[in-house]
C-alpha cells in the first residue's frame, strides 16, 4: 500500500474533520483505557504515532526505541483492518479528531497525575483535538496543566518544560482551538524560570493577539502577575549571585524596550502585568525591584514616578514596599539612586521616612556608606528615635549583650548577657568592651545569628572571615534547633505527628565537611590565605537528568557546623548526616544532607537516603520567628538529589 502524499493527507484531514466519521479506532481502545491506572502511560497509540507510522510504513522502526517497537504490531493490525485500499482511512482521521467523550475523560484524569513530559505529551496528543479537549486542558484557570508541569520539574529541566508548553500552545494555534489567558500566563512564568527573552517575546505577542491592552487585559482578572514578577526577580538574583558580570541587557530590552537601537512598538511586560498602582502597589514594587537588578535607568525612573504618585505615607505596607525597592537598589550597588529615591519618599511624607524602623533588613541600608549617611537627614520625630533604637539593638545583638531590668536596682537598667547561664549574668561595674575589643557577651552563641544576618550574604572575603573567626572561637558550642522542613504546613504537621519528641541541636564548627579534591590544613584566625574551600563555602545544585542545575535550583552556602538529633529527652544524641549552613542568597539557615556530620566527602551527588529531605529550613529555637533577609524568597526544593562541590561565588 503506497502512502498518500502530504497534499492528499492534508486535504483528507480537512474534509474528514468536518464530519463525524467512524468511531472504530476509539472504540477499540475505550475498554482498555478504562482499566489503566491513573498515573500510568496509555499503551494506545496516539494519533500522531498512527500517522507517523502510516507515512513511513516502508521504513523499519527505530530498533532502539522500545515504545515504537511495542506499538508496531497493534498499529499494523489496526491499519490492516480499518484502512481499505479502495477508500480513505476513516479510522485514522477519527483518531485525529478524537470525538469519544469517555476517551477524553480518561485522558483528563491522566493529566491530573502525570509527572513526566513523555506522558504529558501522550495525553495532549489524545486530548487536544477539538474545542472540548482544549477546554478540558485549560479548565480551572489552567491549574491542572500547571500542576502537571510542576510535577515534571523534579525530573525535567526548566528549558524542556518550557519547550513542551510552547508545543502545546502551538498545537492549540495550529488546530485553531481556544487559547485562554491563563495558559499565556503559564508560558510567561516558565519563560521567567529560564530568563529567556525570545520566549517572553512570543508570549507577549500572543498576549497582544488575544486583545491585551493597558485598559483591558486578558490577564487582569483571574491571573497572578505577582508570581511571574517574583520568579523573574528570583532567577535574576540567582544569576547575578552566581556571576556578578551576568549580562542583563537582552532581558531588559525585551521586557521594557530600554537599550534597543530601534525600539519596536509591541507590548511589554508592564503592559501585560501592571494595573493601577493605588490598588496593586505590591506588583509595582516587585517590578521596580526587578528593574533595579536589571540596571534599568529610563524605565526605572518612569515607573518610580508613577509609583510615587500613588504613594500613601500612612499605609505601612505601602511604605515597606517602597523601601524594598531601596533595598534592591542598595544590593545592586546603586546606592546613589537608592538615596535619591529615599529623598523622594521623605518629601512626600513631610520630611520623614514613616515606619522605616520597622523595616526588615534595615541594617543593610544602615551599613551602606551612602544610604546610611543619607538616612539621618531624611527622617525625624518618632521615626528617627525608632531608627536609633533599632540601630543600637542591632549593635548589641552582634556584641552578645542586651538591656534587661536589674532586679537588685529596680530603678535602673543594666546590660546582661544574652545567654541565661553566662558568667556575665550582670555587670553593672564592668566594661561592655575590653581593651582588646572583646565584648562582655563575646563568647555567647546568640551572637552568631545576628552576625550571620549582617555578613552571611556577602561575597566579600573580609565579611566572610568575620563569620569564620566567630565560628572558630565558638567551636563546640551547641544550640537547640527547630525545623520548618519546606514550610509546607501539611507536611510539617505530619512530621510532628510522626516524630513528636524529636530534638535537634546545632554543634558550632567551622567547615566540618571537606572535599577530597580540596583538603584543608588546620584553619585558624591567623591563616593568611583564604579561598572558597577554606571559608567553608559549599554549593548544592539540584540534579535533573544527571545534570546539575543553576539558578534557583542551586544553593550557595557557608558551613556553620553539624546537626545532631535524638528521638526523645532520654535518648542519646547521634549524628544526623546533616550539616548546618547559611543560605548566602536568601539569608536564612538550612540543614543540608551530606551523609555524615563531619569528614571528607567526594565532589558529586549527595546520598539519597536523607531521613527528612535533602534540605530543611531550620532556625534557632530561641528565634522561632526569625525571617529570611529576602522577603520574596521561595522554599528550597527538599527532594534532591543535590550535586555537592565547593562554591566559587566569592569576590
Image (cartoon, grey):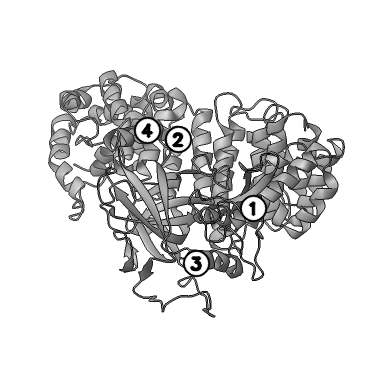
Q: Which mark is residue 11?
A: 4
The crowding category of the residue bearing disc 4, from other C-alpha atoms within 10 Å (few below 14, some 14 to 19, many at least 20), is few
Q: Is residue 329 visible?
A: no
Query: Can you identify the residue that label 3 sits on?
Result: 473
Q: Give the farthest residue toward the front.
A: 408
Q: Secondary structure at mark 1?
A: helix
Query: Can you identify the residue that label 2 sits on?
Result: 174
Query: Can you identify the residue that label 1 sits on?
Result: 396
**Mark in front: 4 vs 3:** 3
CA gap, disc 4 and disc 2: 15 Å
Earlier along the polypeptide chain: callout 4 or callout 2?
4
**Mark in front: 1 vs 2:** 1
Asked whether 260 or 95 is in front, the reply is 260
CA gap, disc 3 and disc 1: 19 Å
Answer above or below: position of 241 versus 327.
below
Q: Where is residue 133 shown, x and y percent of the image?
A: 37, 25
Amino acid at each position: 500500500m503506497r502512502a498518500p502524499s502530504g497534499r492528499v493527507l492534508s486535504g483528507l484531514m480537512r474534509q474528514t474533520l468536518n464530519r463525524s466519521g467512524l468511531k472504530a479506532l476509539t472504540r477499540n481502545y475505550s475498554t482498555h483505557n478504562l482499566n489503566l491506572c491513573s498515573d500510568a502511560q496509555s499503551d494506545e497509540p496516539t494519533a500522531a504515532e498512527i500517522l507517523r507510522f502510516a507515512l513511513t510504513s516502508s521504513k523499519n522502526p527505530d530498533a532502539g526505541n522500545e515504545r515504537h517497537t511495542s506499538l508496531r504490531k497493534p498499529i499494523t493490525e489496526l491499519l490492516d483492518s480499518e484502512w481499505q485500499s479502495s477508500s480513505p482511512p476513516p479510522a485514522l482521521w477519527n483518531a485525529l479528531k478524537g470525538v469519544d467523550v469517555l476517551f477524553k475523560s480518561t485522558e483528563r484524569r491522566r493529566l491530573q497525575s502525570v509527572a513526566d513530559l513523555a506522558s504529558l505529551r501522550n495525553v495532549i496528543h489524545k486530548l487536544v483535538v477539538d474545542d472540548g479537549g482544549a477546554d478540558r486542558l485549560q479548565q480551572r484557570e489552567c491549574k491542572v496543566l500547571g500542576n502537571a508541569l510542576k510535577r515534571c520539574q523534579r525530573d525535567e529541566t526548566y528549558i524542556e518544560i518550557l519547550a513542551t508548553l510552547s508545543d502545546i500552545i502551538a498545537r492549540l494555534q495550529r488546530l485553531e482551538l481556544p487559547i485562554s489567558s491563563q495558559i499565556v500566563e503559564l508560558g510567561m512564568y516558565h519563560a521567567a524560570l529560564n530568563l529567556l527573552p525570545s520566549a517572553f517575546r512570543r508570549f507577549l505577542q500572543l498576549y497582544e493577539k488575544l486583545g491585551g491592552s493597558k485598559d483591558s487585559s486578558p490577564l487582569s482578572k483571574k491571573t497572578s502577575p505577582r508570581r511571574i514578577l517574583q520568579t523573574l526577580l528570583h532567577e535574576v538574583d540567582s544569576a547575578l549571585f552566581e556571576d556578578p558580570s551576568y549580562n542583563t541587557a537582552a532581558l531588559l530590552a525585551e521586557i521594557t524596550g530600554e537599550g534597543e537601537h530601534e525600539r519596536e512598538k509591541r507590548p511589554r511586560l508592564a503592559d501585560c502585568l501592571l494595573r493601577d498602582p493605588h490598588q496593586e502597589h505590591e506588583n509595582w514594587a516587585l517590578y521596580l525591584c526587578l528593574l533595579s537588578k536589571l540596571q534599568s535607568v529610563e524605565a526605572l525612573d518612569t515607573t518610580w514616578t508613577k509609583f510615587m504618585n500613588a504613594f500613601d505615607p500612612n499605609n505601612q505596607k505601602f511604605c515597606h514596599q517602597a523601601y524594598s525597592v531601596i533595598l534592591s537598589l542598595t544590593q545592586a550597588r546603586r546606592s546613589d539612586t537608592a538615596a535619591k529615591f529615599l529623598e523622594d519618599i521623605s518629601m512626600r511624607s513631610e520630611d520623614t521616612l514613616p515606619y522605616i524602623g520597622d523595616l526588615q533588613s534595615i541594617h543593610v541600608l544602615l551599613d551602606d556608606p551612602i544610604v546610611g549617611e543619607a538616612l539621618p537627614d531624611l527622617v525625624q520625630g518618632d521615626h528617627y528615635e525608632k531608627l536609633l533604637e533599632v540601630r543600637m539593638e542591632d549593635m548589641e545583638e552582634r556584641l552578645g549583650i542586651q538591656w534587661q531590668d536589674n532586679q537588685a536596682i529596680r530603678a535602673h537598667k543594666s546590660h546582661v548577657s544574652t545567654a541565661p547561664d553566662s558568667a556575665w549574668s550582670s555587670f553593672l561595674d564592668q566594661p561592655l568592651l575590653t581593651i582588646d575589643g572583646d565584648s562582655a557577651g563575646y563568647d555567647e552563641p546568640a551572637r552568631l545569628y545576628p552576625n550571620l544576618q549582617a555578613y552571611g550574604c556577602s561575597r566579600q572575603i573580609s565579611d566572610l572571615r568575620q563569620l569564620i573567626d566567630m565560628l572558630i572561637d565558638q567551636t563546640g558550642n551547641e544550640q537547640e534547633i527547630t525545623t520548618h522542613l519546606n514550610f509546607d504546613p501539611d507536611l510539617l504537621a505530619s512530621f510532628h505527628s510522626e516524630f513528636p519528641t524529636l530534638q535537634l541541636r546545632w554543634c558550632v564548627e567551622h567547615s566540618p565537611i571537606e572535599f577530597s579534591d580540596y583538603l584543608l590544613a588546620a584553619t585558624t584566625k591567623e591563616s593568611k590565605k583564604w579561598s572558597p574551600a577554606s571559608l567553608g563555602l559549599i554549593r548544592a545544585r539540584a540534579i535533573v537528568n544527571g545534570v546539575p542545575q543553576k539558578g534557583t535550583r542551586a544553593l550557595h552556602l557557608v558551613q556553620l557546623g553539624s546537626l545532631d538529633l535524638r528521638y526523645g529527652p532520654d535518648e542519646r544524641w547521634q549524628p544526623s548526616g546533616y550539616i548546618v549552613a547559611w543560605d548566602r542568597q536568601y539569608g536564612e539557615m538550612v540543614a543540608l544532607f551530606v551523609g555524615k556530620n563531619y569528614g571528607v566527602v567526594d565532589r558529586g551527588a549527595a546520598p539519597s537516603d536523607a531521613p527528612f529531605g535533602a534540605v530543611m529550613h531550620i532556625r534557632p529555637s530561641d528565634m522561632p520567628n526569625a525571617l529570611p533577609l529576602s522577603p520574596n524568597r521561595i522554599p528550597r526544593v527538599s527532594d534532591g538529589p543535590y550535586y555537592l562541590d565547593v562554591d566559587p561565588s566569592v569576590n
